[in-house]
Image (cartoon, rainbow, N blue to C red):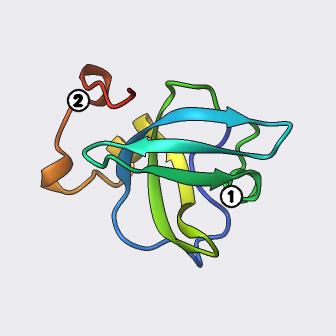
Amino acid sequence: MGATHCVNLSAATGPFLPARIKWFDKTRGFGFVTIFGNPMDVFVHMETLRQCLISDLQAGEAVAVRTGEGPRGKMVTEIRPWESVMMDDPPPPEYDVELEDTDILE
């Protein structure tokens, strides 16, 4: 991933949550993430990546996300590399896990 922060934070609220990229298709401009402890996939749009200075995502990649309500339900509003969030803004205690050791993709 590219940068470690998002340029437009206006839609991002709440703590960063640990997640993994389920899949992302750069050509189609969207994909889904799986947030640890949440059975539902969350939509991520290419525009969010652009705003966060990220050019692409790979399946299985560890990230941290903030979510909000989009036109069709919950969506990612901010995304960062997992390592950068652990240094700058750790997740709340209920997400105190080693993301590398968790299997949140099914």
Q: Residue 50, can we see it?
A: yes
Q: Is residue 63 left or right of residue 37?
A: right
Q: Nearer the viewer, residue 28 or 16?
A: 28
Picture quadrant where residue 15 is located: bottom left
Residue 96 in the image: state x and y as whole percent: 16, 43
- Asked where in the image residue 86 lies, by quadrant, the reply is top left
In what element is the residue under mark 1? helix
The alpha-carbon separation of the residues under discs 2 and 1 comes to 25 Å
User: Which residue matches tag 1?
Assistant: 48
The quarter of the image holding the C terminus is top left
Residue 52 x/y as whole percent? 66, 54
Q: Observer-nearest residue: 92 or 75?
A: 75
> Disc 2 designates what residue?
98
Q: Amino acid at mark 1?
A: Thr
Q: Residues within 10 Å of mark 2 (few under 14, many from 20)?
A: few
The quarter of the picture where the N terminus appears is top right
At label 2, the amino acid type is: Glu
Query: From the viewer's perspective, is residue 98 above or below residue 54?
Result: above
> What is the x, y in percent for residue 28?
82, 42
Q: Which residue sits at x=60%, y=32%?
A: 23
The residue drawn where x is 62% and y is 52% is 44
Viewer-side residue, 65 vs 31 = 31
